[in-house]
Image (tube, rainbow, N blue to C red):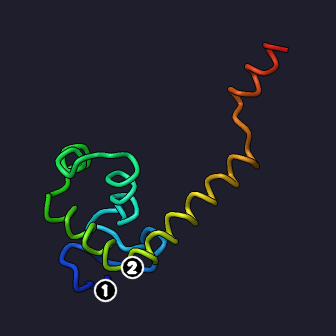
Amino acid sequence: MSEKSPYQHIVSTPDTAGGKPRIAGRRITVPHIVIWREQMGYSVDEIATQYDLTLSEIYAALAYYYDHKEEVDQLIAESEAYAESMRQKTPSLLAQKLYAQAG
């Protein structure tokens, strides 16, 4: 059962997307929307078109972000740290092959 937030279109359930706030009925999280908008520079229209979202879903995610900025920024930082640790533990096979060819 999902817990409806006061932000229309935003839900959070422990068994979906690690409990991160997300677009209802989707696995697209608020951090995804924030990264696409704030870090990658996508417009709201581009996000809507590329991910088949409504403008109201995107604006709800952004409203949630601005009301919970510290929490969402922490989720993004944790995800980036995890991705970096995985990159360190699992080197790129292509990079290894190119390095071997260059040597």
Residue 12, image quadrant: bottom left
- Identify which residue, 84 or 94, lies in the foreground: 84
Query: Could you say where residue 75 lies in the image, as x and y percent from the top left?
Result: 50, 69
Q: Earlier in the sequence, mark 1 or mark 2?
A: 1
Name the amino acid, label 2.
Thr
Residue 15, image quadrant: bottom left
Q: Residue at x 14, y 65 (%)?
A: 56
Query: Could you say where residue 42 lies in the image, as x and y percent from the top left?
Result: 29, 46
Q: Are marks 1 and 2 in contact (CB under 8 Å)?
A: yes
Query: Could you say where residue 92 lies in the image, as x and y percent from the top left?
Result: 69, 35
Residue 80, image quadrant: bottom right
Q: Residue at x 27, y 68 (%)?
A: 61
Query: Could you say where residue 74 lies in the image, as x and y percent from the top left?
Result: 52, 72
Say whether residue 91 is left or right of residue 75.
Answer: right
Q: Find disc 2 in the rendering and name its residue.
A: 13
Q: Find disc 1 in the rendering and name its residue.
A: 3
